[in-house]
Amino acid sequence: MGAQSHSGVRAGGSRRIALTAIILAAATLAALAGAGCGKSAAGKTPVVFWQFSPLATVQPILDRFRAENPTLDVQVEQLTWQSGREKIVAAIAAGRPPDLCELGSTFLPGLVADSTLADLTDSTTDIRSALVGWDGVSYRGRAYAVPWMVGTRALYVNQDLFRRAGLDPQKPPATWDELYRAAHQIAERVPDAKGFGMNAGEREVLFKKFMPFAWGNGGDILDSTLTKSVINSRQNREALRFYLALKPYSLLERQEMHEQAFAKGRLGIIVSGPWLLRTLPKTAPDLRYTVALMPRPATGHGTPASFAGAEVLGIFRGSKHRAEALRLARFLVRPENTMPLFLATGNAFPAAASAAADSYFTTHPLDRVFLEQLRYAVSPPLHPKWVEIEEIVNGELEEAIYGTKRPEQALADADARITQVLSPKP
Amino acid sequence: MRAGRPSVGLLPWGICFAVFGLFPLLYALLLSFQDMNPLRPDASHFVGLANYAHALGSPSFWHALRTTVVFVVGTLPVTLVLAYGVAALLGRIRRAQSFFRAAIFFPATLSMVVVSLVFKSLYAEDGLMNGWLAASDLARVHWLQDPRLALPSIMAMDIWASVGYYAILLLAGRKTLPVEQLEAARLEGLTAWQVERRIVLPHLQPVILFVVLLNTIRSFQVFIEVFVLTRGGPLESTLTLVYHLYERAFYHFEMGYACAIAYLLLALVGVVLLIQRRVLRSAEVAA
């Protein structure tokens, strides 16, 4: 009995300690949770901003914003490309999204489809002409984000391999025929070299790689009303047949391997973005290469189309400080704030139209090619079902590339499946 | 006094487990009965067993399950046999024991992301593997681009990464072998193979059971390797169940459906573990 009461006293003491620990933990969690909402410590209105650039790059820009807006407290956080998407989704699900968020244009359709983003059309009318890239953020005439940085892909050409293959290194391929001939000659005449980089083993990028040829030939995935599939068009079939004709002379690999092979001088032509302009001087200082517009179907026919991607600024409907977030977004897209970002990362160009006049582009002609390419770049449609449509297109293209389906069959199957996705559910 | 302290000591772990383990587990079970889009949590609604029915009627689910089972069946026995062999060799080494044990265990200390990135380079068109093939006058192989080779390539990497860990567990088991028993066996003139089969193997049964169960759970959950190396491709040849549920959750925003897949996987792993346990226990009794 004595032992019982003795242990009972001790157990009671333990329970008190346990209770104290739980209360302390709860208080800590409450304090942490409270830190993220309402007014911040100094009585300023907090604006939570999530973005992907290194903090050292955006911090000076945000410091200028803070100086201009002393009543706002910008709380910036850097996301990673590996897990940013999951973090954003989790924050929305938890009902605590950031006020302003950088979003990749390929992530946008899903968000618009679920009405997660605030409609910014009426509050951005005055800056519409100052920015490019509105196509990629608009659905049925309404804008759901503000274009911040825009990017595209162009043709990189190894001039040494051109010379060794008997081609003119000063004349990059401008048409499909010229591209085919160049890829063929390099693969045939230069030992251990391939002519063209064809993406394989990464299904998720295939539509971005193939559609430029289709767009350039007048093809598309959906019609202009976004209600009907047009993927099985004559233009798309021609484009896919041409694309697959390059396969025997191509390196079938993932994009990063294409870029490595190009840097090593083993690949004649690849389609890539401006980031390669920053890395090649370091990884392959002796490589002689140039950048050109994507080839058009034939001289005087079609366009040198490419894929248009963008980093955009979105405001979630759940944001507690929408007006302040919009003020920050409008500040960030100014050319004087986007040029430092471009110069620091070099991956995408300012959406601010006037940035093209910056003196940087007169001294960097290869970057200027990308600005020119942007004029012909096409954004995927901001359709609510785009995630499913893109998956279908990628899957069928992969079948065609691996030869498990003929190109005509792949496009016909894609058409049937997209039509099914677009048809209203009973 | 002694009864009180452990519970207090376990409290931090208990709180963490409740918040980060038990709550998500139960919440996921709840979600598996809902049509839940994480972007529109307010529009969630109860759908009963519809998500489970959807999964069981989906060709993608069965394809992913088949791929996962191939992965488990392909890696589990090979890993076990290799780990057993490595443990036996490590037990016989008399010089530089620490070095060899550390070297064998080293892959287990690496994050699977790091291992996958290293193998991504090794498997590249002009990577080390193809370099060796070229040096031997053999044709280059598209390790991760060929639909027939992508899954075996990932399985080989996974075996390499996990053999060391299990070998050390088995080696620890070998160290508990009674010396007198081994001496008696030698005096009776048993060969090394007979000693291994009649004394060592029965003695290691509990450790083997543990290794098999642990490896089974881990293999059914294969995700990072696929995420880093192939993203389920080419031609969905490496689309495993966890990668499939990840795509449904974070690309298609079908969180309820993804949770249903997770619970189907949990049930499957549970059944497999029960069968394995029963089979290995009966083998232990028979021995």
Image (cartoon, coloured by chain):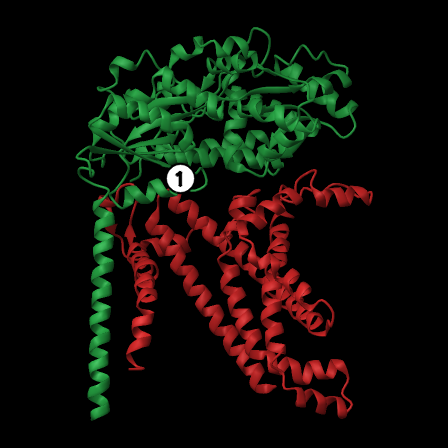
Q: Quadrant of residue B80?
A: bottom right
Residue A317 x/y as whole percent: 23, 34
Residue A424 x/y as whole percent: 31, 35
Number of marks: 1
| Residue A138 shows in this picture | no
Chain bearing tag 1 is A
Q: Amino acid at mark 1?
A: Gly
Residue A312 x/y as whole percent: 36, 26
Residue located 63% across and 73% down the image:
B171
User: Going by the image, does A264 lie left or right of A73?
Assistant: right
Residue A139 x/y as whole percent: 31, 24
Can you tell which chain is drawn red? Answer: B
Q: Residues within 10 Å of mark 1 (few under 14, many from 20)?
A: some
Position of the N terminus of chain B, as image quadrant, is bottom left
In the picture of the structure, the residue carrying the numbered disc 1 is A84
Q: Nearer the viewer, residue B3 or B210?
A: B3
Please identify the residue farthest to the top as the structure is shown. A300
| Residue A58 shows in this picture | yes
Above or below, B156 against A309 in this view is below
User: Going by the image, does A297 lie left or right of B197?
Assistant: left
Residue located 81% across and 43% down the image:
B135
Label 1 element class: helix
Position of the C terminus of chain B, as image quadrant, is bottom right
User: Going by the image, does B178 lie left or right of B279?
Assistant: right
Can you tell which chain is drawn green? Answer: A
